[in-house]
């Protein structure tokens, strides 16, 4: 049984090399954000786009929260308190995402952005304590930044319209 320090990449994934399926799924998951933000910019009177953007953002925020449930189950280097923190945190994004779809679009988008940023902070906390693939945090930064930018564009479009 080998224990990895937080600075060591997982032996099954070379440091920095993102598996192709992760690239396709991760970046592909940004397409609805980009498309809906574009609708907000160029056709803000379309009645459904802001609800669709918030709903998609809520689904994705809930999904990324669930990552920490999986990490809590799978990472061997966590003490009981750290594992508990991961389990507890994993439900917080869903609890932020659900009311976001019920709020006015600009406020809902702000809540989702706060949730994505808070989750990224939790990702850094976890990565400092466990062996994560070298590509994980850079990918999470890019995905989070793009999702937050699209939500911000959507919020601005709803305020301007």
Image (cartoon, rainbow, N blue to C red):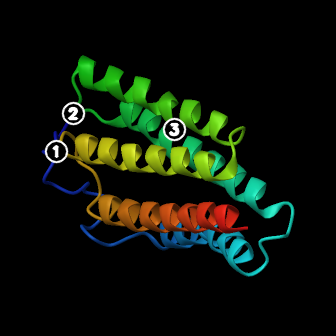
Relative to residue 86, is residue 64 drawn left or right? right
Q: Is mark 2 on a helix, strand or loop?
A: loop
Residue under label 2: 77
Q: What residue would you read off at disc 1?
A: 4
- Seen from the viewer's position, the closer of residues 80 and 161 is 161
Do the numbered discs 2 and 1 sit on residues whose CB atoms are within 8 Å?
yes
Going by the picture, which residue comes out furthest to the right? 47
Q: Is mark 1 on a helix, strand or loop?
A: loop
- Residue at position x 71%, y 69% from top? 36
Which sits earlier in the primary sequence, circle 1 or circle 3?
A: 1
* Spot occupied by residue 128 in the image (x, y as percentages of width and height): 18, 44
- Quadrant location, the N terminus: top left
Say few, some or many: other residues with alpha carbon within 10 Å of mark 2 (under 14 / 14 to 19 / 20 or more). Answer: some
What separation in Å lies between label 2 and label 1 (alpha carbons)? 7 Å
Q: Is residue 145 visible?
A: yes
- Left/right of residue 157 with respect to residue 88 in the rendered view: right
The disc label shown at residue 66, or none: 3
The percent coordinates of residue 87 (x first, y second) are 42, 25
Q: Is residue 27 above or below residue 114?
A: below
């Amino acid at each position: 049984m080998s224990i990895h320090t937080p600075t060591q990449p997982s032996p099954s994934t070379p440091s920095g090399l993102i598996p192709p399926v992760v690239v396709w799924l991760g970046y592909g998951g940004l397409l609805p954000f980009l498309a809906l933000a574009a609708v907000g910019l160029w056709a803000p009177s379309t009645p459904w786009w802001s609800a669709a953007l918030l709903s998609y953002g809520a689904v994705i925020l809930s999904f990324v929260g669930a990552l920490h449930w999986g990490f809590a189950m799978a990472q061997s280097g966590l003490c009981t308190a750290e594992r508990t923190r991961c389990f507890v945190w994993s439900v917080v994004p869903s609890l932020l995402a659900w009311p976001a779809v019920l709020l006015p679009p600009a406020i809902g988008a702000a809540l989702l952005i706060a949730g994505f940023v808070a989750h990224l902070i939790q990702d850094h906390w976890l990565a400092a304590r466990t062996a994560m693939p070298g590509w994980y945090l850079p990918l999470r930064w890019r995905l989070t930044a793009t999702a937050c930018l699209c939500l911000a564009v959507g919020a601005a479009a709803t305020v301007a319209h």
